[in-house]
Each structure stands twice: as C-alpha cells, then as structure tokens.
Image (cartoon, helix red, strand yellow):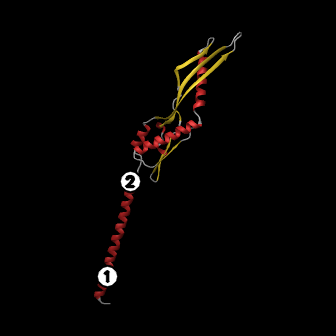
Amino acid sequence: MNKHTIRLFAICAILLLVALTGLWLFMRSHTVFSARMENSNKIGLTPEQIQSIKDIGQWEFLSISEEELVDTTRKGLFSDDHLVRIYQGTLRIGVDLQQLDEQSISFIGDTLCIELPPIHLLDEDFVDEANSRSFHESGRWSSNAREALYQKAKLQMKAHALTPENYQQAQAYGETEVERLLRNMGFEHTMISFQTAKP
C-alpha cells in the first residue's frame, strides 16, 4: 500500500468520523428539542387558575323545595293542647370550592384529573321562617316547644330531600358544569370525581 493510498484512506476515515459525529450531535439536539417542546406544551393548572376556581366558593348543583306539616300534642287534665305548624324551606346541595385541595389535581397524559370536595348541604339555615305558619294551635306554648317543633321540621326536610337519588342527580349536574368550566379554561380532556363526605 503506497503513501497515496494510505493518505486517501485516512482522509476517508476522518470524513466518516466527522459525519458520524455530526449525525450524533444532530440526533441528540433534536431529541432534546423535542423533549423541551413536549414539556412546554404540557398543559397545567397555574396557581392563578386554581385560585380562580376556589374563588367560586359554594357552587349549588341542586335545590329542593320542601314543605312539612309537623305537630306536637300536650296532654291535659281535661283536654289536650295541640300545636300544628307548616314549615317551608329550600335545601341546596353542592360543593364548596374553597375546600379544593391542590393535591387533588393531577394529569394522566393530556387528561386533567380533578377530585372535588364532597357534595353536601351548603346551608343549614334552609327553613324559610317568614313563610312558615301555624295550621292549628290550642293552649299556650313556650319558645322551647316551638323550637323543638322547628327542629323536628328540619329533620323531616333533610330526610325527604337529602336522598341518594338527589345526591346522584347533583353529582351528574356538577360533573357537567365543572367539565364546561374547565373546557372554557382550555382543558379539552378532563376526569371529574368527588370526595366522599365524611360521616
């Protein structure tokens, strides 16, 4: 092998090495660029967006109007006294987004997963006392007796309104509304769930 052939072989080897090095650098930079692009395109909830959701506060998903007739009887020596009253009220079921836990927000791929606070009765003062009235009253009744009747009416309203069916209806409506809210914020794929209320 003469010097000319050796020199030609060396030049080819150097050019091949340079080409392979350039190809490796190109592939590496392309991979890094793609990873950066993927990370930059990854959608996330910003602290401002989370706060804007929490600022909604109480979100009513279902309201139930109730009317209850409750009575009490007091035995007397010659006759019995009766107190019968009609109470009206509106029970509101929903969530309090102030209780939203940032740890309950995550991503599975491009799907935003959010676990909302439990659905519950938003306000315990749901009896409309202004529209409550006496249906029948005989004898004198103390304020304690009237308060006991009021509490009895509240318990009956809860028993009739806070049913599993109504909670399911509220949850279905809530999922739709929260999904619409998140879509308006730019999240196309969402998975909505609710925490279980503590007993």
In this rendering, position of residue 183 left or right of residue 19? right
194 and 40: which is toward the camera? 194
Q: Amino acid at mark 2?
A: Asn
- Compared to residue 138, the image places residue 123 above or below, namely below
Give the residue number, with chain letter if any, for mark 1.
10
Q: Are marks 2 and 1 in contact (CB under 8 Å)?
A: no
In this rendering, position of residue 29 left or right of residue 57? left
Label 2 crowd (10 A; few <14 / some 14-19 / many >=20):
few
182 and 42: which is toward the camera? 182
C-alpha span from label 2 to label 1: 46 Å
In this rendering, position of residue 176 left or right of residue 141? left
Tell me where residue 194 appears, x and y as whole percent: 52, 42
Give the residue number, with chain letter if any, for mark 2.
41
- Compared to residue 136, the image places residue 194 above or below, namely below
* Mark positioned earlier in the residue sequence (2 or 1): 1
Helix, strand or loop at mark 2: helix
Q: Residue at x 33, y 74 (%)?
A: 19
- Compared to residue 138, the image places residue 158 above or below, namely below
